[in-house]
Image (cartoon, grey):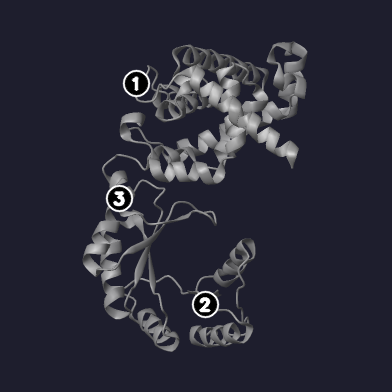
Amino acid sequence: MVSVDVYRPAAREQLRVVGAAVGVAVYQDKDSNDPLALVRGAMKHAQETGYDTLMIDTAGRLHIDDELMTELERIKAETKPIEVLFVADAMTGQDAVRSAEVFHERVGITGVVLTKMDGDARGGAALSIKQVIGQPVKFVGVGEKYDAIEPFYPDRIAQRILGMGDVLTLIEEVQGKINEEEAQEQLLKMTRNQFTLEDFRNQLGQFKKLGSMSKLMKMLPEQMTGGLSLSDEQSAEVDQQMKKTEAIIDSMTKLERNNYTVLNASRKTRIAGGSGSTIGEVNQLLRQYEQMRKMMAQMNKGGLLGGLGKKMMGGLAGGLGGMLGGGGGGMGGLGGLLGNGGASEDFDNGYEETKDSLSKKLKKKKRHKKRK
């Protein structure tokens, strides 16, 4: 990669840091502030060192800035790129469409990267850009981390726009970032009512890998969320509460995490001091944990833990929401919001059947490990 953004302070250094983090080489020439000279040097370096791909990160610009647009035309003429990707901010709506149209007229765009799709924008700009310039949206950005970029799937964006969520992407996120064997073990513990604070802490760690709560809620259909969304402030509040919950559980001994009934007043005082919280917050967490166990026991009796589809996800999210929310105030409504209660014929496949299936899978994996 090479950055030719010589206008924004530390822009080239920023790309160097990103490249180091993801393991991609970045060409730098600190003695030059000429975009064309940087491009020529990067192309020569790539050819001499055997790289078959060079990604040129140009400076951000408005389509009305004629001088910078001319610079872009010269860079394209110099490099003759295979791809010219226009990075558009989904939050700008129709302004992004107008910018894309002018860029396409002057430079020739082969594709679009739509960023900030994890924000409030549902992606209507994607449809308009495709219609106006006739070039496809190839990727969408769904966060600020290095792995927060996804291939663009038109049908999934259409579902988001219509309020139908994007469950397929959510499933792919879960499959790619959640340890399947650990998840199955935790599910089996839930069916046996053996879910401990240790398990809950592990579940929090896995849940955090999926991203912010607001991002996950956008992937769920409106019929599951009641049309409610989280603001950035509310999402940050949930993330902060998750950290506090983890700190409280981390301050417990292994015995206390696996058997919460041993927690007396002196132990709670020690835990509060070690986690930077209050005794009231420790008690609140324990009350919510007990409520969660009761909810799982009720689901267990009704066979709801036998279904691994919508009800399983809804019930877990409901328990998580209750644990994080502190009851009535703050984010406490998430419990009722995502855990829709009630049985579902489509997903209630029977508790005993699922428990036996999971037991067989886990035993088979353990036997396989022993043979290894």
Residue 155: mark in rendering: 3
Task: Name the residue at 52% across, 34% down.
Answer: 238
**Where the N terminus falls, by quadrant?**
bottom right
- The answer to whether residue 313 is left or right of residue 223 is right
- Choose top left, top right, bottom left or bottom right for residue 302: top left
Disc on the earlier residue, 2 or 1: 2
Look at label 3 and name its amino acid.
Asp
Mark 3 vs mark 1: give the one in front: 1
Task: Tell which circle, 3 or 1, labels the residue nearer the N-terminal end.
Answer: 3
Residue shown at the point (62%, 87%) measured from the top left: 48
Query: Residue 338: x, y in percent?
Result: 41, 27
Q: Amino acid at mark 2?
A: Leu
* Label 3 Cα neighbours within 10 Å, binned few <14 / some 14-19 / many ≥20: few
Residue on which disc 1 sits: 345
Mark 2 and mark 3 lie on one chain; the one further toward the N terminus is 2
Is mark 3 in CB contact (under 8 Å) with mark 1? no
Q: Is there any visible trace of residue 276 in the rendered image?
A: no
Is 121 situated above or below 34?
above
Please identify the residue farthest to the left as the structure is shown. Answer: 131
Residue 215, placed above or below residue 66: above
Q: What kind of element bears circle 2?
A: loop
In which quadrant is the C terminus drawn?
A: top right
Q: Which residue is mark 2?
A: 54
Residue 99 position in % (x across, y down): 30, 68
How far apart in space, not on screen, are marks 2 and 3 (Cα)?
Answer: 31 Å
- For residue 197, what is the image quadrant? top right
Query: Taking 263 as reference, is 134 above or below it?
Result: below
